[in-house]
Image (spheres, rainbow, N blue to C red):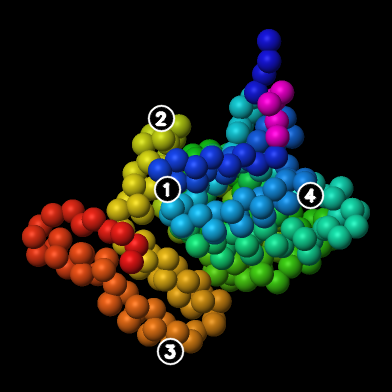
Amino acid sequence: MTTAFEHASPPVLNIDNGVATITLNRPARRNRLENGDLKVLLGHFESLNRDQDVRVLVLTANTAGHPKPVFCAGYDIGGFDEPGHGAIFFEEIPDALAELRPVTVCALNGSVYGGATDVVLACDLCIGLTGIEWRMPATALGLHYYASGLQRYVSRFGLAGAKRAFLTARAFSAEQLNALGLFEAMVGLPEWDGVLAQLVGDILSLAPLAVQETKKSLNEIAAGQIDEALLRGREQLTTRSADFAEGRAAFAERRKPVFVGQ
């Protein structure tokens, strides 16, 4: 008889009707990320950016067999000793995820630790499972974290929350994370699939071009890279789009718009 653990693999990509799902798939190791997994993730990200039909990416994990589900136990620190890898290579993953064209949703269906917390923060939206915890132990290991990760922490947790994460290495409960505004929703297993499906559906109902361009602008503003001329250009692009014309017509006619992404 085979078990879920025997089907472990690098992160698995599936695409269905404009929605891509990447599943971390090493449950026996609490989905700890190896250097090979990071390379696979980068490949998945590149292919999704090229696939214009994909509008939403859901990032989740196989937690089969876990008494207490773990989304990801972080980076395999043994990988630091592999040439060309370590913190600098790991940083490429959340940075690339943050810049993806599709809207990214982390379906955080278990506890998360270490560098994997920054992968979660790199997603645009997140739903969290009740009862999970979150811990950043970088300083407990003697490590000063990389710049973009610190920036994401301050942006998403606020300075006080980021200091608590790094200067105490204490775990956050799901309730504390929710109070920080990290979750779009915090739900139990019975409601999980329905809440995730509703969130993805809401995103898919929006005008694709407007969502794509607005995501770029929000990320730039959060990073302090405000170029008003660039933002105005995106605004003008959408006001001239077929989707904006359709959106106005649908509003006037009290019907659901049919957007085409142009």
Separation of residues labelled 1 and 3 (CA atoms): 31 Å
Look at discs 1 and 2 and give the one toward the viewer: 1
Residue type at mark 4? Asn
Asked if residue 247 is positioned above or below residue 77 in the image, the reply reads: below
In the picture, the disc for residue 190 is 2
Choose the circle earlier in sequence order: 1 or 3. Answer: 1
Residue 98 relative to residue 6: left or right = left
In the picture, the disc for residue 18 is 1
Which residue in the protein does label 4 denote? 35
Residue sitting at x 77%, y 46%: 36
Q: Does residue 54 show up? A: yes
Residue sitting at x 42%, y 66%: 212
Residue sitting at x 55%, y 54%: 48
Residue type at mark 3? Ala
Dot 2: element:
helix
Separation of residues labelled 1 and 2 (CA atoms): 25 Å
Rendering coords of residue 115 (x, y %): 70, 54
Q: Nearer the viewer, residue 198 or 135?
A: 198
Q: Does residue 182 show up? A: no
Marks 3 and 2: CB-CB under 8 Å? no
Q: Which of 153 and 194 is in front in this view?
A: 194
Residue type at mark 2? Pro
Residue interval drawn in magenta: 5-9
Which residue in the protein does label 3 denote? 229
Look at discs 4 and 2 and give the one toward the viewer: 4
Look at discs 1 and 4 and give the one toward the viewer: 1
Dot 3: element:
helix
Separation of residues labelled 1 and 4 (CA atoms): 28 Å
Marks 4 and 3: CB-CB under 8 Å? no
Image quarter for residue 61? top right
Rendering coords of residue 140 (x, y %): 79, 56
